[in-house]
Amino acid sequence: MIKKLVGILAIVMIAASLSLARQTNVDNSRFVERIRKELVKLPYFGVYDNLSFEVKGNDVILYGQVVRPSTRSDAERRVKRIEGVDHVINRIEVLAPSSSDDGIRRRVYRAIFSSDGLYRYAMGANPSIHIIVNHGRVTLEGVVSSQMDSQLAYMAANQVPGVFSVINNLRVER
């Protein structure tokens, strides 16, 4: 009788822990989605900015590069307001103002989004390809639908006059 009771108790405890683990994963994914939504809704977040984050417990670490200092501070302020966030560590880099880099940004934008098939990545409020320019060095961030699109964007950026190097961090969606 005691063995049966201990067995039933063990099964109940395992089921409860699995249910709690499943609930924690659902809550964590909602938490992550809420942070992502807050970041993409920033008023000056655009194609020339890149933001990412990491969640460690109830702490959020912000990463990326932005053109405006206000975008950096707005990102931190918005994430701090989210229920459940205890601390925000802001590691977002504000890119130095440069008319040369601004010109490269515009030329890379035109080169990529005027390429056959890549124009669709510029549509919408938040383009899926982000162009980061720092001292003439271009980094492409974001998500594209195929490896071919990633290569096309890389080649288009690499052909822009004034670009010293291009790093292609475009990910192909599953």
Image (cartoon, grey):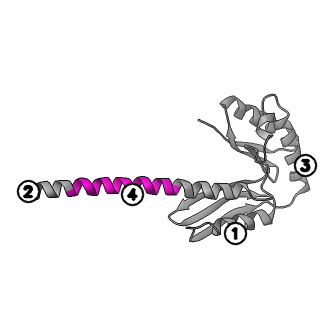
Density class for disc 4 (Cα within 10 Å; few <14, some 14-19, many ≥20) is few
Element under disc 1: helix
Where residue 113 sits in the image (x, y, percent)? 83, 37
Q: Are marks 3 and 2 in contact (CB under 8 Å)?
A: no
Amino acid type of the residue tagged 1 in the rendering = Arg
Q: Which residue is mark 2?
A: 1
Q: Quadrant of residue 159?
A: top right
Cα separation between marks 2 and 4: 28 Å
The extreme bottom residue here reads 86
What quarter of the picture does the N terminus occupy? bottom left
Q: Can you tell which of label 1 and label 2 is closer to the viewer?
A: 2
Amino acid type of the residue tagged 2 in the rendering = Met
Q: Can you tell which of label 3 and label 2 is closer to the viewer?
A: 2
Q: Are marks 2 and 4 in contact (CB under 8 Å)?
A: no
Density class for disc 1 (Cα within 10 Å; few <14, some 14-19, many ≥20) is few
Residue 75 belongs to the span the image colors magenta: no
Q: What predominant SS class does the magenta segment belong to?
A: helix
